[in-house]
Image (spheres, rainbow, N blue to C red):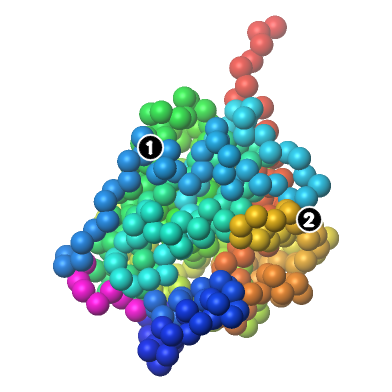
Amino acid sequence: MAGRSRKLLWGAGIVVALVAVSAALFGPKIAMILMFIQASKPPSTTFAATPQPPAPDYGSPASWAALPDRKDDADVVPAMDSTESQSAAPVDVFFLHPTTYFSNKTWNAPVDEPMARDIVEQDILRNQASAFNACCRVYAPRYRQVAYGAQQASPEEAGKAWDVAYSDVRAAFEYYLSHYNHGRPFIIASHSQGTMHALRLMEDFITGKPLREKLIAAYVLGVPIPTDVFAQTLPDVPLCNSPEQTGCAITWNAIGPTADTSLFHVLQHRYPSGKKASIVGKAVTCTNPLTWKTDEAPGERSAHLGGVRFAMGAGAPPKLDPALVDAQCRNGWLVITPPEPQTYREVLLGADMYHVYDYSLFYGNIRQNAQTRVKAFLQAFAPQTPP
């Protein structure tokens, strides 16, 4: 990934000027793409020589992108859907957002950086976290995420930035448990960078711990996860293999038939020994959101309940787009038929790479399935009335 990304930087001086021009002439999406290209190299100073932004204070509501008792973008629902139920939900979701800081000025993003905040609030919360607001109270912390450019650095340098970001995620989860959770069962949901932190969080707080009994499910999307990560790091959190199973994990990475998945080879997964390793040469895991199974049986287009793309900023919520794709797990990747609407193909990481749309393409299925698993969990653990 690093090599391919750096090739994109040929002519980067021109890109700097194009970002400003394109924002004025073509709108924020084109500007975002060009900024993404510009930022695809590590910071120019070492991690140790780069000042770190201040850590967030999770006692302040400003350090949370979404909280259930205030109005925010995690509250949106698709048109024709009125099931936003956070105020009465008996279950929480702890949501970790993906990378939204496309800069190489620092190794970790300030939590108040305007563009990164806007993308989290107006895009990620709307198109990912809101899928859970029919079943759950949505908590989404801000954190000093690893900058996109920093992810292209050597594993040793990048690892320091990942540790900073995770220290925030850990602090946010501890604050959530102490002040917000009040013993309720919960879902962990994440995407991309957020999933890397979610896996480490589950290793530290869930597996082998009493809190494991409160985990309904973990939707850890957007990162190829080797099967041995679950076997070694999360041995008591199996992959979900039915729509109603609880205490398990769901994961997929949506691609088309021609995708080049070497883009993800730069990722370094943690193992209990302290060792880190990439996915190269490893079997990876896949859940099919049209069947909620881990086998390679195809999911039919008729089972697709709908994708959705909420626009950034204000605007009327769109309807779900049903029957967009079929899907099949192949060699650990969720291979889909390319969706026809352009709105699901505007920002691709490469040809046939639907990473940005892992949630929004299957929004309707995720929304329904989260409710199904919550219902199954609550029924299974409901107090029994004596005869």
Indicate the position of residue 39 as horizontal and vertical percent values: 39, 76
Q: Can residue 345 be seen in this view?
A: yes
- Which quarter of the rendering shows the C terminus? top right
Q: Mark 1 points at which residue?
A: 60
Indicate the position of residue 335 as horizontal and vertical percent values: 65, 71
Residue under the point 45% across and 76% down: 35
Indicate the position of residue 349 as horizontal and vertical percent values: 54, 76
Label 2 secondary element: loop
**Relative to 252, is 4 above or below?**
below
Q: What residue type is labelled 2?
A: Lys
Within 10 angstroms of label 2, few (less than 14), some, or many (20 or more) residues? Answer: some
Residue closer to the observer: 195 or 289 = 195
Q: Residue furthest top?
A: 387
Q: Is residue 43 magenta?
A: yes
Dominant SS type (magenta)? loop
Q: What stretch of residues is rendered in magenta?
A: 41-47
**Relative to 84, is 157 above or below?**
below
**Relative to 290, is 341 above or below?**
below
Q: Which mark is residue 258?
A: none
Distance from disc 2 to disc 1, alpha carbons, whole Å, reads 34 Å
- For marks 2 and 1, the one nearer the N-term is 1
- Kindly report which numbered mark, 2 or 1, lies closer to the viewer in this rendering: 1
From the viewer's perspective, tell me whether residue 146 is left or right of residue 290.
left
Q: Name the residue under label 2.
A: 319
Q: Can residue 201 be seen in this view?
A: no
Residue under the point 20% across and 71% down: 46
Label 1 near label 2: C-beta < 8 Å?
Answer: no
Residue closer to the observer: 217 or 364 = 364
